[in-house]
Amino acid sequence: MATVFDYSGQTVLVTGGAQGIGRGIVEAFAASGAQVLIADLRLDTAQALADELNARDLSAEAVGIDLADREAISTLLASLPRLDVLVHNAGYFPLTAFADITPQVLERTLAVNLSALFWLSQGALPLFSRQGGGNVLVTSSVTGPRVAYPGLSHYAASKAGVNGFIRSAALELAPLGVRVNGVEPGMIRTPAMDNLGDSLLSARIAASVPLGRLGEPQDIAGAMLFLASEHACYVTGQTLVVDGGATLPETLAALN
């Protein structure tokens, strides 16, 4: 991904960075000169990505972590000597009919998608304070804040909560020089799309997007690079929809 952003000397933590959207974000920040910490449940995959980036003379390190574990989050943040950008991208969203959602599914969805955002941000505050500011970025979703998808009520609720966090945390942390923003992806071509069904469904979704294609991880990464940069220094408490225009029509019939 070509980039005009310079993050040389900055440390960026990306959760869920081993594949999909997270991998795109990791690659974009690393290519822009940042030292990137890839925090992921899949340590082997994260390490493979770090090795690949290091072989290209980029700077990346992998760490295995379960984002549902508050103590693990605290330990990770306490171990960092510096942090400039925190990107909470990790997500949990098993496709589950509303009537079949169990306490375990709901609790883990909220823990990974929403609660972890609180603990990560709290843990980052001492680091941001020492540096006089920082950035919190979140991968939210159009699902929940703007639209609905069958089988994702638990996920939608967590992402609506994420957007509420972005606005409220931005207000409270602004005096500390900390900006809080998010990106709401639409349908992005990643391995996680396997959760949504077969390839024919993906093709139908792509055909319904006004720009005529599914999004790519690089599309989300570009928005993250912008929001963390000085070009967006007066932007906080906002989410940027990156969905190819999919949420623009009033009804699906408008696309036919």
Image (cartoon, rainbow, N blue to C red):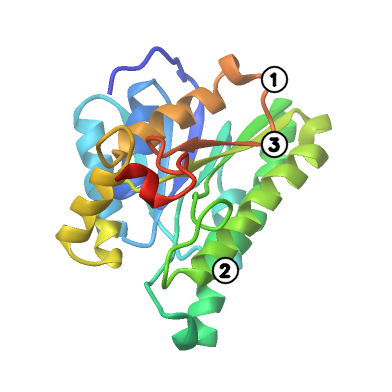
Residue 107 coordinates in the image, percent (x, y): 56, 77
Comparing 89 with 212, the one in front is 212
Quadrant containing the C terminus is top left
Q: SS of the residue at dot 1?
A: loop
Mark drawn on residue 234:
1
* Residue under the point 25% across and 24% down: 57
Number of other residues with Cα within 10 Å of mark 2, as a class: few under 14, some 14 to 19, many 20 or more: many
Q: Earlier in the sequence, mark 2 or mark 3?
A: 2
Comparing 186 with 125, the one in front is 186
Image-quadrant location for residue 116: bottom right
Q: SS of the residue at dot 3?
A: loop
Residue type at mark 2 is Ala
- Asked whether residue 72 is in view, the answer is no
Residue 67 coordinates in the image, percent (x, y): 50, 63
Quadrant containing the N terminus is top left
Residue type at mark 1 is Tyr
Residue that extends furthest to the top in the rendered view of this protein:
4
Q: Is residue 253 left or right of residue 169?
A: left
Q: Is residue 218 above or below residue 38?
A: above
Residue type at mark 3 is Gly
* Residue under the point 70% across and 51% down: 164
Asked if the residue at tag 1 contacts the one at tag 3, i.e. Cβ–Cβ closer than 8 Å, the answer is no
Q: Is residue 196 left or right of residue 252?
A: left
Number of other residues with Cα within 10 Å of mark 3, as a class: few under 14, some 14 to 19, many 20 or more: some
From mark 3 to mark 1, how far is it between C-alphas? 10 Å
Q: Nearer the viewer, mark 2 or mark 1?
A: 1
